[in-house]
Image (tube, rainbow, N blue to C red):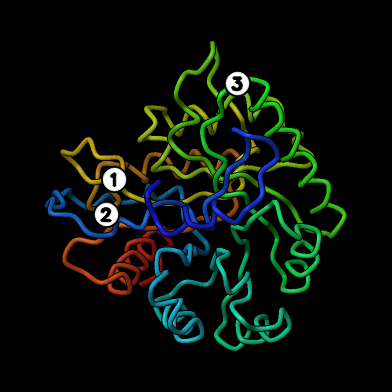
């Protein structure tokens, strides 16, 4: 995780050494450029039996533009067809120098709902939960914990998540955890992600499946959706470039190797509620151009033109 978000680790508190390190505060890496060429893959169509109602975008996909002018980016993504957004927290806070009230008012003006936000769960979490409820968010999400060194450290992680879940419940919202590839790698006789799922209270902790990172971690998204039915309530729809072993290989939706037409109906049948586009590398486009193309791809799954 060599990226701008890792800088936040230097100022974020931790529970214990080796436990709950948090980069600030989106979903992954700042490596948005590559010399690799994105492979051309035939567009995949969603089965007729499944239709998306609404879809959103994780704003970290547009981090450079968003940092310059949050209001302009929110207006643009609304024009692209996104009706939902997921936020992220950096030095300017969850509301990007606006009050929660003013932030919500602007979202209303551009016909967008912020359904969730990634955030630092170690500092002022109670206050963030209260403000998130005021803005109308349904979820605050932990975006990253990092590989842990012991099973006991993983237990501290799940204990922390359960506590965060209770804080959110008390504020009238919900808490979720966003996965990365490392938690699907065998460790000390277990799969850490299974440990997280099995040791978090379903009444307090939901989960956000980053489909890209499940695939990159060598796991099957459909198997996890079925095994932990109704636990994954949000997902990141992020495609993976073909013909590369690189970890950071996201690409425009519909041009990569992930068969969303196969996965998303399974997600819907097992309790998925929010579908959020995300992209962190760009080949021959700007981030905003890719966001517009991704919206068109997802719009095809709604049955709307």
Between disc 3 and disc 2, whose residue precedes? 3
Measured as percent of width and height from the top left, residue 70 is found at 50, 81
Image position, residue 9 (x, y; %): 54, 51
Is residue 254 or residue 118 the one in the foreground? Answer: 118
Image quarter for residue 20? top right
C-alpha gap between disc 3 and disc 2: 34 Å
Q: Do callouts 1 and 2 mark residues in contact (Cβ within 8 Å)?
A: yes
The number of callouts visible is 3
Q: Which residue is at a point 30% across and 46% down the rendered structure image?
A: 248
Secondary element at tag 1: strand
Q: Which residue is mark 1?
A: 240
Residue occupying image coordinates x 71% and y 50%: 175
Q: Name the residue that disc number 2 marks.
A: 251
Query: Circle 3 is placed at which residue position?
Result: 150
Q: Is residue 198 left or right of residue 170?
A: left
Cα distance in 3D space between marks 1 and 2 = 6 Å
Q: In this rendering, would 73 be left or right of 292?
A: right
């Amino acid at each position: 995780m060599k990226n701008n978000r890792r800088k936040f680790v230097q100022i974020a508190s931790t529970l214990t050494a080796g436990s709950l390190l948090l980069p600030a505060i989106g979903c992954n890496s700042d490596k948005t450029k590559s010399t690799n060429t994105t492979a051309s893959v035939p567009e995949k169509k969603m089965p007729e039996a499944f239709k998306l109602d609404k879809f959103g975008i994780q704003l970290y996909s547009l981090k450079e533009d968003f940092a310059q002018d949050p209001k302009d980016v929110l207006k643009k993504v609304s024009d692209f067809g996104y009706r939902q957004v997921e936020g992220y927290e950096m030095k300017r806070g969850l509301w990007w120098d606006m009050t929660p009230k003013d932030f919500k008012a602007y979202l209303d003006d551009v016909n967008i709902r912020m359904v969730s936000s990634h955030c630092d769960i170690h500092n002022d979490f109670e206050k963030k939960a209260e403000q998130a409820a005021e803005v109308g968010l349904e979820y605050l999400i932990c975006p990253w914990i990092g590989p842990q060194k012991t099973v006991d450290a993983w237990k501290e992680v799940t204990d922390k998540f359960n506590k965060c879940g209770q804080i959110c419940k008390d504020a009238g919202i919900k808490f979720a955890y966003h996965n990365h590839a490392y938690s699907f790698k065998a460790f000390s006789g277990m799969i850490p992600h299974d440990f997280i799922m099995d040791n978090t209270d379903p009444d307090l902790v939901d989960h956000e499946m980053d489909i890209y990172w499940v695939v990159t971690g060598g796991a099957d998204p459909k198997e996890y959706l079925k095994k932990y039915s109704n636990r994954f309530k949000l997902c990141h729809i992020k495609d993976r470039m073909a013909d590369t072993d690189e970890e950071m290989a996201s690409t425009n939706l519909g041009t990569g190797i992930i068969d969303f037409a196969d996965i998303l109906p399974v997600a819907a049948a097992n309790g998925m509620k929010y579908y959020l586009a995300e992209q962190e590398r760009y080949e021959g486009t700007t981030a905003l151009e890719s966001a517009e193309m991704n919206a068109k791809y997802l719009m095809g799954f709604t049955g709307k033109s």
